[in-house]
Amino acid sequence: MARILFFGRLRDVAGCAALELEQCGADLGALRDLLTRDNAALGAALRDQSVRVAVNQEMVAHDASLEGAREIAFMPPLSGG
């Protein structure tokens, strides 16, 4: 089981701050595909290359493996000054 976290505007698009998934796929691409099935807008938002991803609290590349993932966090870019 993995906990999926959404921050900032992604939380608004997802309609929740977190969800639990029994199966999240082998990699981030598979997870995005899974999330897109229920929410096309969320899938599009998560494919934005400026969105940062952390797996088990470590920043990862957009094609990272999810083997052993317990927590996946999607974070939009920070703005402001």
Image (tube, helix red, strand yellow):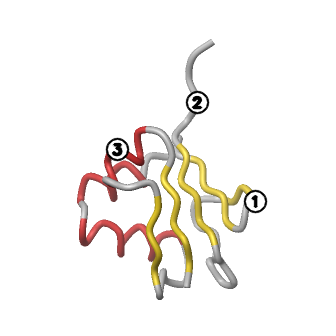
Q: Secondary structure at mark 3?
A: helix
Q: Which mark is residue 58?
A: 1
29 shown above or below 43? below
Residue that carries the numbered disc 3 in the rendered image: 12
Q: CA distance from mark 1 to mark 2?
A: 17 Å
Residue depicted at x 44% and y 68%: 19
Tell me which amino acid carries mark 1.
Glu
- Image position of 27 (left or right of 58): left
Q: Quadrant of the C terminus?
A: top right
Residue 34 sits in quarter: bottom left
**Quarter occupied by residue 80:** top right
Q: Callout 3: 10 Å neighbours few (<14), some, many (20+)?
A: few
Task: Of the two numbered discs 3 and 2 on the same chain, state the one appearing first in sequence.
Answer: 3
Mark on residue 2?
Answer: none
x 55%, y 46%: residue: 75
The label nearer to you, 3 versus 1, is: 3
- Badge 2: how crowded within 10 Å, few (<14), some, or many (20+)? few
Badge 1 element: strand
Q: Residue at x 66, y 84 (%)?
A: 67
User: What residue appears at the point 51 percent right and 46 percent down from the top-left corner?
Assistant: 7
Q: Nearer the viewer, residue 68 or 32?
A: 68
Callouts 3 and 2 close, C-beta under 8 Å? no
Mark 1 touches mark 2? (CB < 8 Å): no
In primary-sequence order, the first of circles 3 and 1 is 3
Q: From the image, tell me which residue sits under label 2.
A: 78
Of mark 1 and mark 2, the one earlier in the sequence is 1
Amino acid type of the residue that numbered disc 2 sits on in the rendered structure = Leu
**Which quadrant of the structure image shows residue 43?**
bottom left
Query: Of the residues shown, which amino acid type is indicated by label 3?
Result: Asp
Left or right of 4 on screen, residue 64: right
